[in-house]
Amino acid sequence: MVNQVPKSKSEPLFEQIDWDFDTLRRTFDAIEEVSRKDLDLDIYPNQIEIISSEQMLDAYSSIGMPLMYHHWSFGKHFLGHERLYRKGARGLAYEIVINSDPCISYCLEENTMPLQALVMAHAAFGHNHFFKSNHLFQQWTDAEGILDYLEYARRFISSCEEKHGIGEVERVLDAAHSLMPFGVFRHRRPRQLSLQEAEEQRQERLAAAEQNVYYLWKTIPSRPGDERERDAALQERKRDMQLPEENLLYFLEQFSPILQSWQREILRIVCNVGQYFYPQKQTKVMNEGCACFVHYYILNALYEQGRMTDGAMLEILHSHSNVLTQPDFDDPRFSGINPYALGFAMMQDIRRICETPEEEDREWFPDIAGKEDWRSVLKYAWANFRDESFIQQFLSPTVMRRFRMFALSDTASESYCTVTGIHNTQGYRHLRDVLARDHDISTQEPDIQIVDADLLGDRCLHLQSVRRNGVPLDSASKEATLKYVEQLWGYKVELAEVVATA
């Protein structure tokens, strides 16, 4: 095939709707030039793949990963998505992007060339930069090793199906998948001690215990089952098993009395997959806002250079506007605040505050108002915040007015709702606090921890759930969760609900 002559920087990159690989390459190179030289984005190497609608549906069903082990639920999800798509009740995403090194972007072959330009700028540069720079992804994910690990997971689970039977493997996977939301580490864990360091610490504890002699207590006759002895035994168990433990799958993998080694490895695989996706749950507004801001800026820059035609730009802006639509509260499509719309609006507003601040902006954001270098401010925010802290730090009264936000208090003890935040100085700050809490997944998801397990006694596993805002656990979900925990633990499991102290 004869390569086309490269177009000059003053000519449109394409004028046709249909795409070919030469046009894709030419457009990708132009997008990359703006992203690196103008926005100074830090990205993984890109791998762009064009896939069919059938392949996109398949990616939907297997949580968007290019490699995944087999499980019946993936086929169920595929059939559900396909039925809605064939009926016209649901469209397909323009792209799927994988947090890996290289960063893989799946683009739908049905996209027109303007749409391909939009999704490449959105995924291959916006999401790509966010994945590489944000501290949560750096801390919790291994972009370089995830594809190799998924290949290992698929091979391992396939070998388990051959050795132990598909039914037995799926029984373990069903339980593990149901516990995946409670199978993540929410906080940074200390470095794992070496065997020598662990033994040294144990010897230090024994020496300290021998020195701490309480002569008064020694004069009191001890009895079997003495409360002090039980407390000491409980503390020893908690120290040995590092309780309380928030990661249920990790604890079951480590301490379950009944699991075989291959079953423990399956729990470990599911736990690692859940941990890989955990940062994405915390950065939906920021991640999508970053990608939308990047594609909007890059494509407008190319348009100003004369490298995008009016027709292509109109189609791009039409798709851009559809993604950022924020339905009104009484619209049948309303399902809360659109994270794409909120993230993009806040990042556009940060640029405005840096370039053309008003007096209100100087009062609210004295550190960045008039700074002009909005690129460094955005890159700092993308790297160091997650949704709730980003909203707490950068949500401005301008954006709150644009979205017509107000805060409501709706408690079960009262028969009416109270407006607690309006558009005044006090109300703006209250609104920002409320919206930030609504995006804090630690307050939205159940907090269930393992607090005790007497492996030498009755082997009962004790769980504790913290009840927030007086809201108890859903009884049906609680019973289903306990059922799966009992299946993997092998003995009785008890769950106690306690009220949050703060």
Image (cartoon, rainbow, N blue to C red):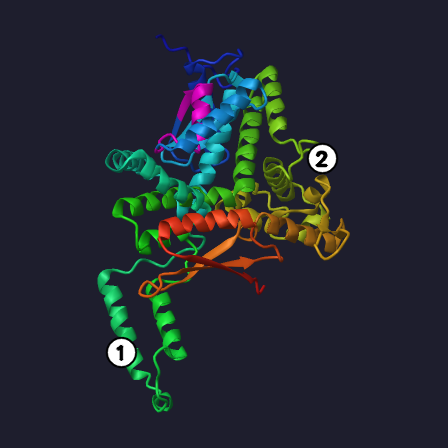
The answer to whether any part of residue 197 appears in the image is yes
Mark 2: few/some/many CA within 10 Å (<14, 14-19, 20+): some
Position of the C terminus by quadrant = bottom right
In the displayed structure image, the side of residue 435 where residue 204 appears, left or right: left
Q: Is residue 55 magenta?
A: yes
Residue 226 on image: x %, y %? 38, 79
Instruction: Note whether 315 is above or below 382 in the view shown.
Output: above
State the residue lying farthest toward the left.
Answer: 196
Instruction: Please tell me the numbered disc located at residue 328.
Output: 2
Q: Is residue 491 magenta?
A: no
In the displayed structure image, the side of residue 29 where residue 350 appears, left or right: right
Q: Nearer the viewer, residue 237 or 297?
A: 237
The answer to whether any part of residue 368 appears in the image is no
Residue 67 on image: x %, y %? 35, 31
Q: Quadrant of residue 192?
A: bottom left
- CA gap between label 2 and label 1 equals 67 Å
Instruction: Please tell me the numbered disc located at residue 207.
Output: 1
Kind of residue at disc 1: Ala
Kind of residue at disc 2: Asp
* Dot placed on the residue nearer the N-terminal end, 2 or 1: 1
Mark 1 element type: helix
Instruction: Note whether 224 is above or below 65 in the view shown.
Output: below
Q: Nearer the viewer, residue 215 or 126?
A: 215
Q: Nearer the viewer, residue 369 or 453?
A: 453
In the displayed structure image, the side of residue 496 where residue 201 appears, left or right: left
Kindly identify the residue that appears in the image at 32 percent across and 43 percent down. 266
Kindly identify the residue that appears in the image at 52 percent across and 34 percent down. 291
Looking at the rendering, the stretch of residues picked out in magenta corresponds to: 48-69
* Number of numbered markers: 2
